Amino acid sequence: MRFNKEVMRLKWQMNRRPSALVTVTVILIILALLAHFQATPLNWLDQALAAPLQTTVTPTKTFLMRLISVLAKPAMAVLYAVVLTGALWYWQRRATAVWVLVSFGLGGVGSWLLKFIVARPRPTAHVLVAENGYSFPSGHVFSAVMIVSLLYFVFARTLPKLWQRLGCLIAVGLWLGLVVTARVYLGAHYPSDTVAALLLGYLWLRTTLWLYRRFYPRLQARLAVQQPTMRHAHKDTRK
């Protein structure tokens, strides 16, 4: 119930700020076009933003950035999403479990499709970790946005104390900042790739919350009807 109230509050907030969604969408489209055509202004800006992160390279720093990158891998994010879905299903929050799985799955597909549409080659300078595929947007950053945001909206946003919610928000921001820093430091992405992933994550989270509001009541009712039926059928089989 608390989660449903928080979702309704998000709806009110989103209706108050439609310009934010439009602004983010426009910025993302502009970045995608500049990255697709490898525009000189974007390349210059990426070099200027990456330089402070890539100037000092040490074995310890590289090890830590590699570790952060491994923990934020899309493959690891899939594992996190499956564990979260399984836990919610076990705790009888089955409609929310379906929402988490669908949100993460469709978001990953959308990020993957955008990579192939933009088709931006990866950086060739200061490459500390070899990566395959296209560069825009960052799959690591997008997956991190999805996982930490889903965790926050499912668990942390309903915490009773303001300082608890703020602490969780700070932790979310710190982790996303570390993932962005790691990907740029390792030379796996341009800074604009990570910014695009953050923007795409924001847009998709707003979309998936809208889908949750629209379909959650029907999904919850259907699962509530099926659950006793399945238990009854199980008892009959044992007889």
Image: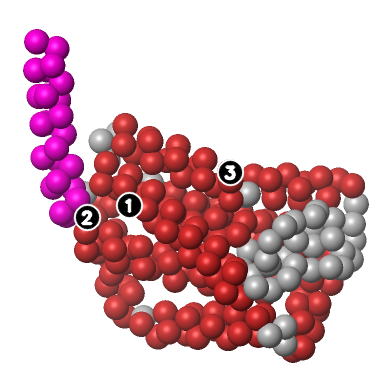
Res. 76 mark: 3
Principal SS element in the magenta part? helix
Give neighbour class at mark 1: few <14, some 14-19, many 20+ (Cα, 10 Å): many
Give neighbour class at mark 3: few <14, some 14-19, many 20+ (Cα, 10 Å): some
Q: Camera-side residue: 164 or 58?
A: 58
Dot 3 or dot 2: first in sequence order is: 3
For image coordinates 67% across by 80% down, the residue present is 35
Res. 118 mark: none
Name above or below for residue 189 compared with residue 226: below
Residue type at mark 2 is Tyr
Q: CA distance from mark 3 to mark 1?
A: 19 Å
Residue 88 x, y percent position in the rendering: 34, 39
For image coordinates 87% across by 64% down, the residue present is 126
Q: Camera-side residue: 114 or 150?
A: 114
Is 28 left or right of 105, judged from the image as shown? Answer: right
Q: Looking at the image, do the residues carrying marks 3 and 1 touch, with CB atoms under 8 Å apart?
A: no
Colour mapping: secondary structure
Q: CA distance from mark 3 to mark 2?
A: 27 Å
Residue 228 x, y percent position in the rendering: 11, 31
Q: Looking at the image, do the residues carrying marks 2 and 1 touch, with CB atoms under 8 Å apart?
A: yes
Residue 98 x, y percent position in the rendering: 31, 47
Q: Is residue 228 magenta?
A: yes
Name above or below for residue 154 compared with residue 37: above
Give the residue pinned by disc 2: 216
Give the residue pinned by disc 1: 99
Is 98 left or right of 217, judged from the image as shown? Answer: right
